[in-house]
Image: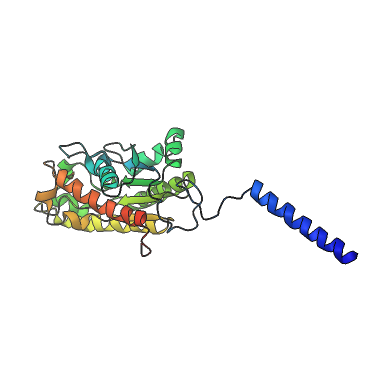
């Protein structure tokens, strides 16, 4: 009698548990959408969902110097949609002339924080205006005593990445590195040492930030200034922006493909 009763209770428990599972299915822990918690920093971007990209920074992100007005941001969207069949929206919040201090102040604004919070990918270019003063000040004599404010720049960069991460813990961050537009200008080639230092500080901030990547540009423009710079000899021209967009998209594309070695 006792054994029969025990079997009945076990069968009843199994039925109730099975019915509950059917009526109340749990979400799979493997399902990850663009804004949900990721298992680790190398999770790939999920293709075919609409990709929300937010662009931050200065005139390079605004596309100044591109006679088509497209810049790397517009070309990034085009490549993702045409070559990767990835539906994409981009919100460009960059401001021409911005320094790291300007971006830092913008990141404290509620509307910008909300926009960043909904992003799947964040791209930015910032810091060139911190490094170089006005072109009319640049000359060989000036560079002999010029010392850019590394401490402020470093602190601002770290604060920028920290604020972005606070408002969006999971979005991939891609930050463009720095090139030297004055490398081929007589008497100004020594400025490359300052650019190298700026790149090192950016790399340091990126390494300290989860799921962040530096996109180098120094080699793209080195000895190619006539080919890739605009007439102001500072901003990229159309071809320069194409090179930047291709390099950025290559990195993002590796996530779309889910390459394990990225």
Name the residue nearer the viewer: 186 or 211: 211
Say whether residue 131 is left or right of residue 207: left
Q: Residue furthest right?
A: 1
Residue drawn at x 25%, y 54% is 247
Residue drawn at x 16%, y 46% is 138
Figure quadrant of residue 118: top left
Q: Is residue 220 above or below residue 260?
A: above
Q: Is residue 47 above or below residue 89?
A: below
Please provide percent x and percent y for residue 172. Answer: 40, 51
Residue drawn at x 39%, y 37% is 106
Name the residue nearer the viewer: 93 or 262: 262
Q: Is residue 209 above or below residue 64?
A: below
Give the mark count. 0
Q: Tell me, yes or no, if residue 237 can be seen here.
A: no
Please provide percent x and percent y for residue 89. Answer: 35, 39
Name the residue nearer the viewer: 172 or 48: 48
Residue drawn at x 36%, y 55% is 255
Q: Tell me, yes or no, if residue 89 can be seen here.
A: yes
Say whether residue 7 is left or right of residue 85: right
Protein image colouring: rainbow
């Amino acid at each position: 009698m006792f054994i029969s009763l025990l079997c009945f209770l076990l069968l009843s428990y199994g039925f109730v548990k099975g019915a509950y599972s059917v009526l109340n299915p749990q979400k799979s822990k493997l399902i990850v959408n663009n804004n949900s918690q990721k298992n680790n920093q190398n999770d790939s971007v999920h293709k075919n969902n609409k990709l929300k990209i937010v662009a931050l920074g200065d005139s390079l992100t605004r596309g100044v110097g591109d006679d088509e007005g497209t810049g790397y941001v517009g070309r990034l969207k085009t490549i993702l949609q045409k070559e990767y069949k990835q539906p994409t929206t981009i919100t460009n919040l960059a401001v021409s002339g911005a320094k790291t201090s300007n971006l830092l102040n913008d990141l404290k604004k509620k509307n910008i924080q909300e926009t960043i919070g909904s992003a799947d990918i964040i791209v930015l270019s910032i810091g060139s205006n911190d490094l170089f003063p006005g072109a009319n000040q640049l000359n060989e004599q000036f560079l002999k005593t010029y010392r850019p404010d590394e401490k402020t720049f470093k602190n601002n960069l770290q604060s920028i990445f920290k604020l972005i991460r606070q408002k969006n813990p999971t979005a991939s961050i891609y930050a463009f590195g720095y090139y030297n537009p004055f490398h081929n200008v007589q008497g100004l080639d020594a400025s490359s040492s300052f650019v190298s230092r700026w790149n090192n500080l950016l790399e340091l901030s990126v390494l300290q930030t989860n799921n962040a990547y530096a996109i180098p540009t120094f080699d793209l423009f080195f000895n190619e200034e006539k080919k890739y710079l605009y007439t102001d000899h500072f901003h990229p021209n159309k071809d320069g922006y194409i090179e930047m967009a291709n390099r950025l998209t290559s990195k993002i594309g590796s996530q779309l493909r889910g390459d394990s070695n990225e």
